Amino acid sequence: MRKLMIALAASAAFAGETPVKDAGTERDLATLAVPETLIIAADIPAARRAAMLASARKFYQFWSTGDEDLLRQTISDRFVDHTLPPGRPQGPAGPAAASKAFLAAVPDLKVVVAQQILAGDRVVSHLHFRGHFTGVFNQNKGRGRSSSAPPISWQSVPARLPTTGIWKTI
């Protein structure tokens, strides 16, 4: 893991930083999950970069919408969540179940991608999950309180899509 972090840092140091337009407030797919800042290692070919960005964007759009078609387009049947919480199934069923629970609790959930780094076969994203707890979670009824979580997500995007693994910290 330490070698991965060093490689990502080194790649980012030699990459260009590109400000990207604001992700907006609509739940429109055209504006969801657009990174506010994008850093790309200089050695990633344009076609590969486009595929990696499209995969990551669809994955984070899935979290905002719950659209399982987006999920199926972005992760493989061999998908492994390396930080799986207790009780959540592995594979595509895990994110699908989590999304249903999150959206039931926070119906206006929106994933904002503050920064995204592409290096090697990794997409590292600093995210903000934002919304209001107006639904139900673990039999607790929300009271409209604003909710925000700032996880960092690491996706492994192999040369042949879709994504096979994800690592994240909160």
Image (cartoon, helix red, strand yellow):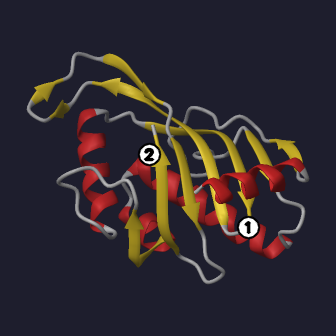
Towards the viewer: 38 or 85? 85
Of 159 and 134, nearer the camera is 159
Toward which corner of the image does residue 133 lie, by quadrant? Answer: top left
Q: Residue at x 90, y 62 (%)?
A: 42
Secondary element at tag 1: loop
In the image, residue 128 above or below residue 18: above
Mark 2: secondary structure: helix
| Residue at left offset 20%, top offset 51% | 86
Among the two numbered marks 1 and 2 on one chain, the one whose residue lies closer to the N terminus: 2
Q: Which residue is mark 2?
A: 64
Image spot of residue 155 (x, y percent): 56, 60
Q: Position of residue 131 (x, y in %)?
A: 41, 28
Q: Tell me the quarter of the image containing the C terminus.
A: top left
Q: Quadrant of residue 157?
A: bottom right
Q: Mark number for residue 120? A: 1
- When the figure is inspected, residue 145 is found, relative to residue 27, above or below; the finding is above
Task: Farthest residue to the bottom: give it.
Answer: 160
